[in-house]
Amino acid sequence: MSDSSSVNHLVRITNCLQTILDLESQLEQLENGHSLLDEFAVLKSFLERIDEVELSESDVERIETATSNFLKELQGPLSRRKPRMGAERRLQ
């Protein structure tokens, strides 16, 4: 695998993981979100050592598909969550 390909895979995987981790504060507001948050420590640990992992194109595609499916599954619950106090303030 070329260095360019490895860097490309690394960037794509990092993007997937960071996208999921960015949802942490929103998941805290979900009724059963705490069960997902337990897995965030694993994701954070993996992200810290992602540059040590060799990934193939098929691995990256599988992770991208899983990330996309995960985000689709969360759309409903996240759209129904109760906003935090002050989170719905609008500028007037």
Image: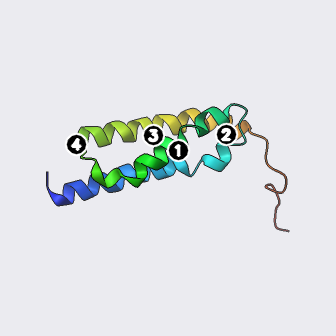
Residue 56 image label:
4
Give the alpha-carbon distance from disc 1 to disc 3, as whole Å. Answer: 17 Å
Residue 39, x across and y down, in percent = 53, 38
Identify the residue under disc 3: 67
SS class of the residue under badge 4? loop
SS class of the residue under badge 2? helix
Q: Say which residue appears at 59% left-offset and 35% top-offset.
A: 36
SS class of the residue under badge 1? helix
Q: Quadrant of residue 56?
A: top left
Residue 78 image label:
2
Identify the residue under disc 1: 41
Amino acid at dot 4: Ser
Q: In the image as oriented, which residue stretches furthest toward the bottom? A: 92
Residue 19, x across and y down, in percent = 50, 50
- Quick check: marks 2 and 3 in contact, CB under 8 Å? no
Q: Say which residue appears at 17% left-offset and 59% top-offset.
A: 3
- In the image, which is nearer the foreground, mark 1 or mark 3? 1
Amino acid at dot 2: Leu
Give the alpha-carbon distance from disc 2 to disc 3, as whole Å. Answer: 16 Å
- Quick check: marks 4 and 1 in contact, CB under 8 Å? no
Amino acid at dot 1: Ala
SS class of the residue under badge 3? helix
- Quick check: marks 1 and 2 in contact, CB under 8 Å? no
Marks 1 and 3, the one that precedes in the sequence: 1
**Front one among 28 and 86:** 28
Quadrant housing the C terminus: bottom right
Residue 61, x across and y down, in percent = 31, 40
- In the image, which is nearer the foreground, mark 1 or mark 2? 1
